[in-house]
Image: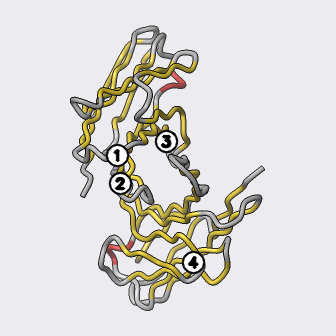
Amino acid sequence: GENVEQHPSTLSVQEGDSAVIKCTYSDSASNYFPWYKQELGKRPQLIIDIRSNVGEKKDQRIAVTLNKTAKHFSLHITETQPEDSAVYFCAASDQAGTALIFGKGTTLSVSS
Amino acid sequence: SQTIHQWPATLVQPVGSPLSLECTVEGTSNPNLYWYRQAAGRGLQLLFYSVGIGQISSEVPQNLSASRPQDRQFILSSKKLLLSDSGFYLCAWEGKGYSQPQHFGDGTRLSIL
């Protein structure tokens, strides 16, 4: 079945710097890759997603890139702010398309 | 618009007691429904998912069970809780169709004593 690896597990940056989180997946049939942000004690919230027919997607300071050949996708956050501090999860759809397989999460800390 | 409700928000239960967590979705029909567990500081573990009434798929064998008695209702149960069942339980829904995102409820924080 699908397996998703996420790196790094923790990431500390200074306010204004960029942050990059990377994920790899194992199932070449996966076609949907969302990213979630989870603040402490809260529910995960979808921040951006990408489908396999697209190589890059941007939404203001957030962008996601997908390399289907290498089976990896990345989240890029530019001009980081303290409120970006949270745990970020990547996910990939399973072969049947009925479930998401999540990475283990990256704890991002943005210091001012 | 669609909304998802989970209750209770927090729950403290003794070992060996039963459990029932409920999740309901409004504003959509025939959603895919999911139960996840998240241990403190850890990732999301998929427990069960359902693509329709009475259809439950289990991802992890354990002492938990799930039921979907109505289209937009998903229930997580246990007859006898273990200490290892402590965690943050999240329900999520997803619309039918190609590459739909999952949307999470606010979760239930379960502590077993």
| Circle 4 residue | B75
| Circle 2 residue | A94
SS class of the residue under badge 3?
strand
A31 above or below B55? Answer: above
Is the Cβ of the residue at disc 4 closer than 8 Å to that at disc 2? no
Front residue of B112 and A27: A27
Amino acid at circle 1: Ser
Chain assignment, label 3 = A
Is the Cβ of the residue at disc 2 closer than 8 Å to that at disc 1? yes
Chain assignment, label 1 = A
Q: Which badge, 2 or 1, is on the more N-terminal residue?
A: 1
- Residue A78 in picture, x, y percent from top left: 46, 13
Distance from Cα at disc 2 to Cα at disc 1: 6 Å
Amino acid at circle 2: Asp
Chain assignment, label 4 = B
Circle 3 crowding by C-alpha within 10 Å: few under 14, some 14–19, many from 20: some
**Who's the residue at 25% across and 47% down the image?**
A27
Of circles 4 and 2, the one toward us is: 2
The image quadrant that residue B9 belongs to is: bottom right
The image quadrant that residue A17 belongs to is: top left
Front residue of B105 and B85: B105
SS class of the residue under badge 4?
strand
User: What colouring does the structure picture have?
Assistant: secondary structure
Q: Which badge, 3 or 1, is on the more N-terminal residue?
A: 1
- Residue A42 in picture, x, y percent from top left: 55, 48
Residue A30: give its label.
1
Amino acid at circle 3: Gln
Is the Cβ of the residue at disc 3 closer than 8 Å to that at disc 1? no
